[in-house]
Amino acid sequence: MFPGYIFAALSAANYVKALSCRGAIEVLGTHKGPSVVPTEQIDAIKRLVAEDAVGEPYPHLARGVAVRVSRGPLSGICGVLDSRSSGYVFYVNVELLGRTLPVKIDADSLERL
């Protein structure tokens, strides 16, 4: 439902530790600090997951769709979506130096052309 997100109750001391975890990019919030997600919203998310009532968050990403990498070291590279690796990671066929190479890319880093 929220690929790439981790929900955690953090103390101020653990805030910095959370950012140092492998793969962590940022903590949801503003320049004043992290945002608090109300308990009611967390409970609603848990109910949706328990009822399997959540649809596919990336319906625009289907095999054969032209995509562009929107962030990361391959930002700007275009290719054709080939298949899903696992979870929200996809293989994108990218043409480089006259060859087509399958590249594993997180769905959050792809935009449909």
Image (cartoon, rainbow, N blue to C red):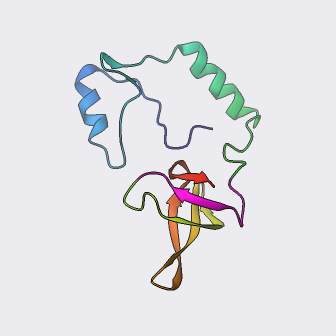
Horizontally, is 52 left or right of 22 in the view? right
Classify residue 67 by image quadrant: bottom right
The magenta segment is 61-71
Q: Residue furthest bottom?
A: 98
Asked if 32 appears above or below 105 in the picture, the reply is above
The percent position of residue 100, horizontal first and vertical second, equals: 55, 81
From this view, report whether residue 100 is shown above or below residue 86.
Answer: below
Give how far across and how far down residue 13 sits, in percent: 22, 24
Between 74 and 36, the residue placed more toward the observer is 74
Q: Position of residue 31 (x, y in %)?
A: 30, 20
The total of numbered circles placed on residues is 0
Image-based side of 102 in relation to 72, left or right: right
Q: Quadrant of the C terminus?
A: bottom right
Q: Quadrant of the N terminus?
A: top right
Residue 55: quarter of image: top right
Residue 31's place in the image compared with 69, above or below, is: above
Instruction: Name the magenta segment's main secondary structure.
Output: loop
Find out whether residue 72 is within the magenta segment.
Answer: no
Q: Residue at x 71, y 29 (%)?
A: 48
Q: Is 70 included in the stretch rendered in magenta?
A: yes
Could you say which is closer to the camera, residue 98 or residue 10? 98
Identify the residue shown where x is 67% and y is 47%: 58
Q: Position of residue 60 (x, y in %)?
A: 71, 50
> Quadrant of the rendered structure where residue 83 is?
bottom right
Side (left or right) of 10 relative to 94: left
At x 41%, y 18%, the residue is: 35
